[in-house]
Image: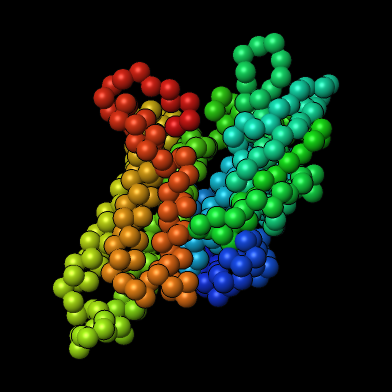
């Protein structure tokens, strides 16, 4: 991870932690956190250098998100959405990409085809409503997936538009990641130039380089894994701090001196460390393939998704261990473990790291016919 990105991640971890209560109460990032994110190189990590972006490696992205999440899960989730949304800049008109995604722009939006668009001359006319639009209150650029109306086979494209064109519906009342502000967004009859729309599954990126051989949804899953690993690492730190001070009722020993606590911490450290190592290995092998041939084979793409899914679910297991080890102290809202618990289980619900991803990877390993369009 380059010094600029490392420093930005450290700063966002600190600011995110400092303002986590405000972000959670407001159900969107606190202004100081949103401003720090926009001023950082994180949102443009996957944006091509040719249009003003950072064009960093997937490994750098995962490491940065993990560090931010150690401070606050919601701050890291919004950073992840901004970074991965920036990938669409490699697919759209380069001049527009520079305007919409180069710093200090912050991207966001939802690729799920909840909208409908029809070509009218050189523009699409787009209407739709998309839930789970994390960071929409501070984003400058949004996208919405849309089915293209026409006589041929259904086609899905990401339609990219100014955040000012969208109406935000306040819907984000959730268990965890409350500070992400993942409300619904809606547009009605806006015009989107054809060059500002792209399919992330069938179109080819307009830019060369190993980064753009990585599948868009694979990078999204890796981003989620980075956030999850950071939440888990933070939970371990929280439990270690608590265990050195807490003496359970009726005991003369601290929580840290109990063998059960020691075992739980060791298991959690092993879960996070091994999961992180596999993510790094899968990214490294895919990067080598992309650098050598410009392509990543289906088997390697399957391993990327599986490593990301495993890391997210292993992280949830590690957080559960720390939450349980914290005992009655962990159930209070004032406990950082309580928030880690809620945040990790909300992150784990994302479809990119769901059990269906395990089935997909399993089908590939078993040599079964598999739809790999979203790998």
**Residue at the far front in the pictured view:** 250
Q: Position of residue 223 (x, y in %)?
A: 47, 49
Q: 280 above or below 231?
A: above
Q: Where, by quadrant of the figure, is residue 258 drawn?
A: bottom left
Residue 23 percent coordinates (x, y)? 60, 66
Instruction: Quadrant for residue 118, please give it.
Output: top right
**In-image side of 244 versus 162 (left or right):** left
- Where residue 363 appears, as percent x and y from the top left, is 32, 26
When the figure is inspected, residue 371 is found, relative to residue 164, above or below; the finding is above
- Seen at 59% across and 26% down, the residue is 203
Seen in the image, is 359 located left or right of residue 110?
A: left
184 versus 200 height, above or below: below
Residue at 67% across, 37% down: 144
> Residue drawn at (34%, 36%), measured in percent from left and top?
358
**Name of the residue lying farthest toward the top:** 151
Q: Determine the residue positioned at 23% across, 78% down.
A: 256
User: Where does the N terminus fall, quadrant-wise?
Assistant: bottom left
């Amino acid at each position: 991870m380059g010094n600029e990105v490392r420093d930005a991640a450290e700063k966002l971890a600190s600011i995110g932690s400092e303002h986590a209560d405000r972000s959670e109460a407001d159900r969107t990032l606190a202004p100081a956190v949103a401003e720090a994110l926009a001023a950082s190189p994180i949102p443009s990590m996957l944006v091509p250098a040719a249009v003003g972006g950072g064009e960093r490696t997937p490994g750098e992205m995962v490491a940065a998100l993990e560090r931010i999440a150690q401070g606050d899960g919601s701050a890291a989730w919004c950073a992840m959405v901004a970074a991965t949304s920036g990938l669409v800049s490699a697919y759209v008109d380069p001049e527009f990409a520079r305007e919409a995604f180069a710093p200090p722009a912050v991207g966001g939006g939802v690729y799920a085809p909840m909208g409908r668009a029809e070509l009218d001359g050189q523009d699409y006319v787009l209407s739709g409503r998309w839930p789970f639009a994390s960071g929409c209150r501070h984003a400058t650029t949004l996208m919405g997936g849309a089915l293209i109306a026409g006589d041929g086979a259904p086609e899905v494209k990401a339609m990219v538009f100014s955040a000012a064109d969208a109406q935000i519906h306040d819907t984000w009342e959730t268990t965890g990641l409350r500070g992400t502000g993942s409300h619904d967004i809606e547009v009605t009859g806006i015009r989107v130039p054809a060059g500002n729309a792209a399919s992330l599954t069938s179109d080819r990126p307009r830019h060369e380089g190993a980064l753009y051989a990585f599948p868009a949804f694979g990078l999204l899953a890796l981003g989620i894994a980075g956030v999850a690993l950071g939440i888990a690492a933070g939970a371990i730190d929280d439990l270690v701090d608590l265990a050195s001070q807490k003496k359970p009722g009726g005991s003369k020993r601290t929580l840290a001196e109990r063998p059960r606590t020691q075992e739980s911490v060791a298991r959690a450290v092993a879960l996070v460390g091994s999961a992180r190592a596999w993510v790094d290995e899968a990214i490294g092998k895919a990067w080598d393939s992309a650098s050598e041939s410009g392509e990543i084979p289906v088997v390697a793409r399957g391993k990327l998704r599986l490593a990301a899914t495993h890391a997210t679910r292993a992280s949830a297991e590690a957080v559960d261990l720390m939450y349980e080890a914290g005992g009655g102290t962990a159930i209070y809202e004032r406990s950082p473990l309580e928030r880690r618990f809620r945040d990790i289980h909300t992150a784990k619900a994302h479809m990119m790291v769901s059990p269906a991803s395990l089935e997909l990877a399993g089908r590939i390993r078993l040599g079964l016919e598999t739809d790999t369009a979203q790998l």
